[in-house]
Every structure is written in C-alpha cells, then in structure tokens.
Amino acid sequence: MSLLQGKVALITGASRGIGRAIATRFAQEGASIAFTYLSSVEKGQALETELSAFGVKVKGYRSDASDFKAAEELVNQIVADFGTIDAVINNAGITRDGLLMRMSEEQWDVVINVNLKSVFNLTKAVIKPMMKAKKGSIINLTSVVGIRGNAGQANYAASKAGIIGFTKSVALELGSRNIRSNAIAPGFIETEMTGEINDKAVEEWKQSIPLKRGGQPEEVADCALFLASDLSRYITGQVLQVDGGMLT
C-alpha cells in the first residue's frame, strides 16, 4: 500500500528544486497532485506530463500564492477538480539578499509577501475543505536561517521565522479539528539556488555540517512525505530540521 494512496496534495512552487522533489515523491506514493508555478508555463506542463507517468491525477495551476484572492480562487478550483485537499505544502519562496544598511523597502516587502504572506493566504484558504473533511496536514517550508538568522538575509530570516510562529499557532487552533500543522527547516540543500554559490564557500559549508555534505531535495521530500502521511498522525506544531546536524 502506497503511503499517500487516495490523498490529494497541493504543492506550491513545484516547478523546481525542493518543490519538484516533493511533487515527484508524493506522486510515487500514490497522491493526486495539484501544484502551482508562477513563471514558466513550459516547466509546469513538463512536470504535469512527468508526474502523470506514475498513474496519478495531476494538474498544474499558474497562480501567485502571495495574492490573497488568487489563493482563494486556486483552492476553490482544486476542490472542484479533485474533490478535496488532504495536504498542503507551502513551498513558494524567494531571496533578495543584502545587508540591512543597503536593503531597499522593495527587497523587504517582496520577500515577506512571497515567503510569509503566501503561507497565510493558502493556509487560510485550505482550512475550509480540511474542516469539512475533519482532517488535513499543513506543511510549511521554513529554513535553518529562520531559526538562527543569517547575515545579509534579514528579510529572508524574518519571513522564515514568521512561518515557524504561524505554524505553531495554527497547530494550536486546528488540533481539535484533526488538522495538523508542521514545518520543515532545510539546511544546506543542493538545488539550482545553491548552485550559484562559489565552490570554496560550498566546501566551507559542508565542513561545518556534522554529516559533511549538503542535503538533496529528495531528502527534504522524504520528510514532507512523512508529515503528509498517517505515519505522523500524532505530530503537530513541530519544526523538523533536515540539515545534517547543522543546528543541534
């Protein structure tokens, strides 16, 4: 029996990196997949084709999670197409790095909007179908940076720390409705985003990690799979660090 057989999962920002790995892992485990992408229509269509090969129902939606009304319309459309939403993975995220003294208001606002407000928008929208079903799993992607901070990332760290506070609050509010809310805090994961960092800096990062290597998107996806499945049915309000021991 596949771990997510019969479940419907909504994954935001699924066209690359961690989001793509989660969508693929969930499809392998039998979940019907609704995913969002923002910029690349071609990438979205390619992912739809790729995931359909696992014999599950898949549909991509071009939607901006940071837009409140668009998030509401997206969830209504997914419920119309799939019948329900069992798990939501809030993964959409961007960086606009820079030291605070040079950071513009626009750099602050766009990161808070895309990373934090999108989590509020989508979680608020999915609560209705989850309450109706009397079950659900909300999984928010935060970061080790949201736990310990990082120079040059005040906006990103604030958005990711905000996700942690939000996740725990939602767990307290919705626990009695059998809706669980947890967060995943990845450490140094090797994706397109980290591919832009120079080799020397990457090597230094790896040496500071107890497991002496960067993580793979699939390793974050396995954690999301656990939280979306019934294996974690008594776990809520937690932040699981997938960081190779970087923060202990």
Image: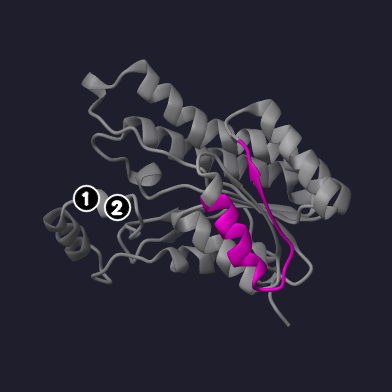
Image quarter of the C terminus: bottom left
Could you say which is closer to the camera, residue 18 or residue 219? 18
Depth order, front residue of 106/143: 106
Up/down of 3 relative to 92, above or below: below
Q: Position of residue 243 (x, y in %)?
A: 36, 61
Who's the residue at 66% across and 73% down the image?
54
Within-10-Å neighbours for mark 2: few <14, some 14–19, many 20+: few
Measured as percent of width and height from the top left, residue 165 is found at: 53, 39
The quadrant holding residue 159 is top left
**Residue 39 is inside the magenta segment:** no
Q: For residue 14, say whether it is visible.
A: no
x 65%, y 33%: residue:
121
- Is residue 164 found left or right of 243 in the rendered image? right
Q: Are marks 1 and 2 in contact (CB under 8 Å)?
A: yes
> Quick check: 247 above or below 122?
below
Please, what is the three-letter code of the amino acid marked with disc 1?
Answer: Ile
Crowding around mark 1 (Cα neighbors within 10 Å: few <14, some 14 to 19, many 20+) is few
Image location (x, y in percent) of residue 66: 57, 31
Residue 54: in magenta span: yes
What's under tag 2, amino acid-wise?
A: Thr
- Judge by depth and name the residue closer to the eye, 84 or 227: 84
Q: Residue furthest front?
A: 42
Q: In the drawing, what numbered circle is on residue 197?
A: 1
On residue 194, the disc is 2
| Rendered-image quadrant of the N terminus | bottom right
| Residue 50 makes an appearance in the image | yes
Q: Quadrant of residue 156?
A: top left
The residue at the far right in this view is: 132
Relative depth, front residue between 71 and 43:
43
